[in-house]
Image (cartoon, helix red, strand yellow):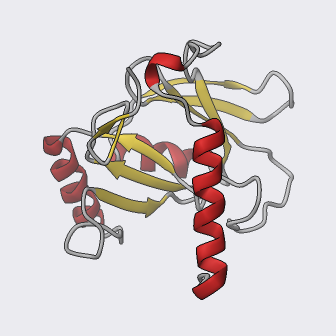
C-alpha cells in the first residue's frame, strides 16, 4: 500500500493535530464512559473446529461456550476467554461463501491483546513451535507479535499493560 509523502503527509499530520486539539481532553476533563467494557467481539470464521483448535491449542484461549446462533439456524456461536471478563466470539454461517480477508473500511485491521512479558515470550515460542509466521521482535517490530488467524483476522500480542500505549497511561 503506497504511503503518503511530502505535502500530502504534512497535511495529514496537520489534520491529526487539529483533531487532537479539538477532541482530545485532559484526563481530569473527560466524562466517564457510558459502558462497562467489551463483553465480546463477534467475528466470522470459515471452519469452527479449525478456529477452536487455533485459539485454544495454539494461542491458549480457553473455549468457554459453543451453542447454536440464536439469529441463524445451523450457525455456531462460540466464545473464548481472553481475560478480565472479556470474550472473543465467533460465528460460522454454513452455506455462505466468504471472501478472503480484505483490509478495507469496516473490517477489523487487528485485535491488540495485552500480555505480560513472560506470556509474550511463551506466545512467541508457541508460534515458533507451530510454524506460524509473525512480525515481531527480531523481525521488525518491538513489543508486538502480529499474526493472522486461519480466518485472516489480524491479532497483535502487545507487551503492554491494559490502558497504556507505548508506556503512556491513557486511562486514569
The front one of 70 and 95 is 70
| Direction from residue 153 to residue 165 in the image, left or right | left
Where does the C terminus fall, quadrant-wise? Answer: top left
Q: Position of residue 78 (x, y in %)?
A: 60, 30
Q: Quadrant of residue 46?
A: bottom right
Question: Which residue is at 29% across, 63% downward?
Answer: 130
Q: Position of residue 156 (x, y in %)?
A: 41, 53
Q: Position of residue 89 (x, y in %)?
A: 60, 33
Question: Which residue is at 76% across, 52% downward?
Answer: 106
Question: Which residue sits furthest left?
Answer: 118
Where does the N terminus fall, quadrant-wise? Answer: bottom right
- 8 is higher (above) or lower (below) than 137: below
The front one of 142 and 43 is 142
Question: Which residue is at 66% across, 80% downward?
Answer: 8
Q: How many marks?
A: 0
| Direction from residue 36 to residue 170 in the image, left or right | left
Looking at the image, can residue 1 be seen? no
Q: Position of residue 94 (x, y in %)?
A: 80, 47
- 3 is higher (above) or lower (below) than 36: below
Question: Which residue is at 64% across, 83% downward?
Answer: 7
Q: Quadrant of residue 144?
A: bottom left
- 7 is higher (above) or lower (below) than 152: below
Looking at the image, can residue 45 be seen? yes
Amino acid at each position: 500500500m503506497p504511503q503518503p509523502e511530502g505535502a500530502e503527509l504534512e497535511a495529514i499530520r496537520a489534520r491529526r493535530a487539529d483533531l487532537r486539539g479539538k477532541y482530545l481532553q485532559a484526563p481530569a476533563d473527560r466524562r466517564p464512559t457510558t459502558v462497562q467494557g467489551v463483553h465480546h467481539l463477534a467475528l466470522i470464521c470459515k471452519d469452527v473446529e479449525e478456529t477452536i483448535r487455533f485459539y485454544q491449542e495454539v494461542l491458549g484461549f480457553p473455549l468457554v461456550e459453543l451453542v447454536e446462533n440464536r439469529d441463524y439456524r445451523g450457525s455456531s456461536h462460540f466464545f473464548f476467554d481472553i481475560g478480565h471478563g472479556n470474550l472473543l466470539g465467533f460465528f460460522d454461517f454454513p452455506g455462505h461463501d466468504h471472501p478472503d480477508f480484505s483490509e478495507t473500511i469496516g473490517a477489523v485491521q487487528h485485535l491488540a491483546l495485552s500480555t505480560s512479558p513472560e506470556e509474550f515470550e511463551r506466545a512467541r515460542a508457541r508460534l515458533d513451535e507451530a510454524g506460524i509466521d509473525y512480525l515481531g521482535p527480531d523481525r521488525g517490530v518491538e513489543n508486538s507479535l502480529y499474526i493472522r488467524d486461519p480466518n485472516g483476522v489480524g491479532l497483535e500480542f502487545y507487551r503492554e499493560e491494559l490502558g497504556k500505549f507505548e508506556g503512556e497511561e491513557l486511562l486514569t
